[in-house]
Amino acid sequence: MSSSSSVASLSVEGDIGVVTLNSPPVNALSQAVRAGILENVNKAVADPAVKAIVLICEGRTFIAGADITEFGKPRKDPPLSEAQDAIENSPKPVVAAIHGTALGGGFEVALCCHYRVAVPSAKCGLPEVKLGLLPGAGGTQRLPRIVGVERALDLLTSGQHVPAPKCLEMGLVDEIVPEGELRAGAIAFARRVLAEKRPLRKVRDTDEKMVAARGKPEIFADFRKANARKFRGFQAPENNIRCVEAAVNLPFDEGMKAERKLFEELMSGTQSAAQRYVFFAEREVWKIPDVPADTPVVAVKKVGMVGAGTMGGGIAMNFANVGIPVTLVETRPEALERGLKVVRRNYENTAKRGRLTNEQVEQRMGLLTGSLELESLADCDLVIEAVFENMEIKQDIFAKLDRIVKPGAILATNTSALNINEIGRAVKRPEGIVGMHFFSPANVMRLLEVVRGDTTSKTAIATAMQVGKKVGKIAALSGVCPGFIGNRILAARTRQAQAMLLEGAMPWDIDKVLYEFGLPMGPFAMSDLAGLDIGWSKETSKRATVREALCEMDRRGQKTGAGYYDYDESRKASPSPVTEKLVHEFMAAAGNKPREITEQEILERCVYAMINEGAKILDEGIAIRASDIDIVWINGYGWPVYRGGPMFYADTVGLQTVVSKLEEYGERMGAADSAISPLLARLAKDGKRLQDVKNG
Ligand code: 3H9
């Protein structure tokens, strides 16, 4: 471990002591950094030549927060508060010099400094809420004293990073210094503080904004109410709010005590453990053991889209958003026109909400070119096919693309169901075939499954991952199997939901349990939203399932005003007596007597079947690691991040419990789901965790 002297140093420039931190990659507040701040600030205070102190960082950023890797481990001295006290109580002014991002504990250190300067590109913020935490080093008490209660509530519960010019406006920084001249600018600022005999300003001693909010509990009540949907299920936003209430109603030191208590509560809970796990999972997911970071990639300067339907148009928007031109090919002029119109409407709606200017709308539309000829894709670096899920059609398209598109270009399919190895057999460049499975709506959903076929080259994989990152997606690598990672797990849940329907649970009973677990909606509400007639046709319908029967009754989901649920004019769902009757008919036909199914059984059968399937996916090497599966389910299906994904959740429940419950439900779960994954059984027996399994 590095000693404090290697991560922190003091240099004296005339009358200014410059304390410099250097702990790559992000100057996180590890034990060594805390000790380094303490030691060097004390040294500067003790040096009679030093009249003022500047705290600055080397490398890409100011302190980006506490060292998250130390969380959950025994604490090591000195605590951060000791370093902060040394700064705040320094008899000489201390100026924080900020570049990159001053985040979390890093910004809390800056808030203890008497003054703050920043370069224009810097950002400050308290993002702890995203880790299921709250700023535990005085941030919740100092922030509202500067920006006021409403703004503090907003910043603390969103965790947003605030650009330096905005920080200046809010009083969070005192001066912006020119880019690239932070050190000189901060020293000059410190000298001005001395020359003007400015006071040793301590945020903790300012109280006006707190006094103004005192006796107004409605501020907090209104804020909670306005954000109830956004905060549903999360503990951290509420604890952050309580801290601000404490800041308003209690003296500073008492407020600090309240903050500590509420922080500890979160730190010891499973939600923060889950959210911290997800923080690292989001970074891990890009790492592919046999595709190193320096793998050559194709520079993607022009993209081709085959298909301008909902999916194709949505995918194209991703590229236009980052300035990459896209040519969209359709077979019929009406379809092309319709596709481009939908994209334009999407952009215009965003503009109406103030998130794009009209000029930006035109700029992005200008990057989209329609065509009726595959030949116009010849010079594309990446072509993504998003047509009807039919193997023959896809193979035909890929054979043509293979002949038309320049050598070396990547040919990707957006299939969510078909075997990309078979698609690869249609071309002479199988190494260039890769799956890029976007989720609907493709311009909104963050997940991209990159699918690796037997012949997919490392370059094709690296290019697909990199391009995914460029357009702001989170990309997870999957091997080939029916449904890939996400939909294969979804299928297990669907099997259980459908099975329980015929045992006595109504769609709304099942949906309620999964909604309360934290998912945005249950499987039946989701079917109604997507349309029950996906993959259904009147001609072939045999009324073999409740879904088919509903489709035959023209109850095809929200779009027809009825599906599993009935919908009113404002699309509000209510349980449907028609569906209930139908379910009873199907139950009788199957010879099932309805039984009382508890909420516990609903949850366990749905979720444990997913876990079991996830373990099979991991065991087969389809996913590299358990956390990739969790990333897929959080970003593609709305699994609550505070439960860390199905694999992490399994570890929190205990694998032994999962296995014994699966055994207990046994036959009732059907052949596919009652077959316990050998990996799951083995880990349970050995007392190990899914999250520690890694392939490759
Ligand atoms: C806190 O401060 C609590 C206090 O209130 C209470 C104290 C009592 N610790 O993201 P990147 C690693 S909570 C340890 O790829 P970028 C990261 O894992 C903290 N490691 O770079 C990665 O490692 P690897 C509040 C950290 O340029 C590498 O650094 N602060 C930490 O895209 C590069 O990261 C936050 O929540 C950390 N704090 O983005 C800020 N941060 O290379 C969290 C990063 O091995 N950090 N690493 O994969 C971030 O948001 C981004 O990392 C940042 C840079 C914007 C700084």
Image (cartoon, rainbow, N blue to C red):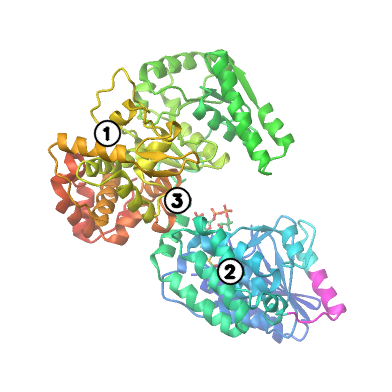
Circle 3: residue type: Glu
Which residue occupies the foreground of this view, 157 or 213? 213
Pair 3/2: label in front: 2
Calculate the distance from the C-alpha at mark 3 to the C-alpha at mark 2: 38 Å
Residue shown at 72% from the left, 62% from the top: 167
Give the image location of residue 192, x and y in percent.
85, 74
Q: Which residues are magenta?
A: 187-201
Is residue 513 left or right of 6 when viewed as pictured? left
Task: Decide: few, some or many residues near mark 1? Use Cα within 10 Å; few <14, some 14-19, many ≥20.
Answer: many
Element type where label 2 sits in the image: helix
The reply to whether callout 2 and callout 1 are in contact (CB within 8 Å) is no
- Locate residue 256: give its quadrant: bottom right
Could you tell whether 412 is left or right of 680 in the image? Answer: right
Q: Disc 3 beta carbon < 8 A from ligand 1? A: yes
Residue 452: quarter of image: top left
Picture layout, residue 537 above or below residue 171: above
Q: Residues within 10 Å of mark 2 (few under 14, many from 20)?
A: some
Residue assigned mark 1:
546
Residue of label 3 = 284
The residue pinned by badge 2 equals: 220
Position of the C terminus by quadrant: top left
- Main secondary structure type of the part rendered in magenta: helix
Depth check: give the residue in front, 307 or 84. 307
